[in-house]
Amino acid sequence: MTGTHTQSYNPPVPSQPGNYRRPLAVVTVLFFMWGFLTCLNDILVPHLKSIFELSYAQVMLIQFSFFSAYFVFSVPASKIVDWIGYQRTMVAGLMIMAVGAFLFVPAASAPSYSLFLTALIILAAGITALQVAANPYVIVLGAPATASSRLNLTQAFNSLGTTIAPKIGGLLILSATPLAIEEMRRLSPVALQSYRAQQAASVKMPYVVIGVLLVLLAVVIACSKLPKIGSAQRELGQPVHDSLWKHRNLILGAVGIFTYVGAEVAIGSFLVNYFGQPGIAGLTEKAAAGYVSFYWGGAMIGRFIGSGLLRKVKTRRLLGLCVACTTTLLITSILTTGHVAMWSILAVGFFNSIMFPSIFTLGLAELGPLSGDGSGILNMAIVGGAVIPLAQGFMADRIGIHHAFFLPVICYLYILYYALVGSEPNSERIRQA
């Protein structure tokens, strides 16, 4: 990714024009599914924490295992796309996801925390393949002028999945009231294992249903006559005397993606336990799970509003405004208690909405033939969703869950810097020099 490139990048193009409403609708379902499954982790965190008596750092291995897949499997998934094409990669991704979902049954029967983590890694590997194939596919399903609009629309349905997942997951998975840690420690080893198996059994039915739906969706995708898309080929051509490392907006943008995804996932992961604190709301896990939907629902509403605002307001300016709001809301939550602390942190979701696509767009500005490599770097940076929640878990174990939210504040302060300064492409900096 450094030095002189002797390749040119041709974006994928559909083999023939046509009406893409039906294939777009089919692919939009995929966005919904991986949004739903990703956010369901926020319900697994408090559930498995109580079952296995885990610390905050230990339970954050759920998010670490899940989001590490983006770093590990993004490049292999792109090679699979080149090998078998976009449609077949989507089918393969869905089948891999189904395997991960079905593994929740033996993980709950054992019950085994390490097997739960293994199932999550496999599930996330399938989602990674799905994202690598589906995102560029949506871009070319229609006129280039409306590509951004289509992607925002599909991402809105992704947000719909993240909005309803906590509510459904809370009803199905957090239905039973767990024993206190002191009560669990008084159980015999046999009784404790039996109790854990009984509590863990609540995940079996939801994930079996999800697995079946994923298989059925894979069959639908496989049998659908989706438009063919030419591969994003790299052909020998005029040398490109450029390097990714010369584009500061890309490198700093990758850090921005890392910190944004990390902050967003960390906040969502801790909300159920946060709202259970006596000084915040004192809610049960099941009741708190319902409120998590407001966090992700705000992102969905904000995405629809933001897509319209971005046509009139410069991306960097709107990104900076949203980041300033999230930082203020988080600091308010840290410094207060009760419902003020609760609703201020829930409101963060609304202002999160435009951040990912905005940072992604700013990071790829003026890359030209290096856009393909740049996109790969930005996608790999999603691994921030694995690292930041784990780091916040270590902090929560030492300084408490309330004040551990200062880590996302630091993340948002970096994104504010990126919006105001770091996102300027090379040409703009040269003009200002």
Image (cartoon, rainbow, N blue to C red):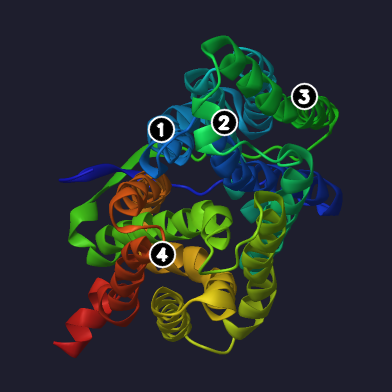
Circle 2: element type: helix
Question: Where does residue 328 sit, x and y in percent of width and height?
Answer: 42, 83
Q: CA distance from mark 4 to mark 1?
A: 37 Å
Q: Label 4 is placed on what type of residue? A: His
Residue 142 visible from this viewpoint: no
Q: CA distance from mark 3 to mark 2?
A: 20 Å
Q: CA distance from mark 2 to mark 1?
A: 35 Å
Q: Residue at x 53, y 23 (%)?
A: 83
Question: Where does residue 112 sit, x and y in percent of width and height?
Answer: 53, 18
Q: Which residue is mark 4?
A: 402
Q: Which residue is mark 3?
A: 208
Q: Label 1 is placed on what type of residue? A: Val
Are dots 4 and 3 in contact, CB under 8 Å? Answer: no
- Please tell me the numbered disc located at residue 51: 2
Query: What quarter of the picture does the C terminus occupy?
Result: bottom left
Q: Which residue is mark 1?
A: 75
Circle 3: element type: helix
Q: Residues within 10 Å of mark 1 (few under 14, many from 20)?
A: some
Q: Quadrant of residue 253?
A: bottom left
Q: Residues within 10 Å of mark 2 (few under 14, many from 20)?
A: many
Callout in the foreground (4, 1): 4
Circle 4: element type: loop
In primary-sequence order, the first of circles 4 and 3 is 3
Q: Residue at x 74, y 30 (%)?
A: 202
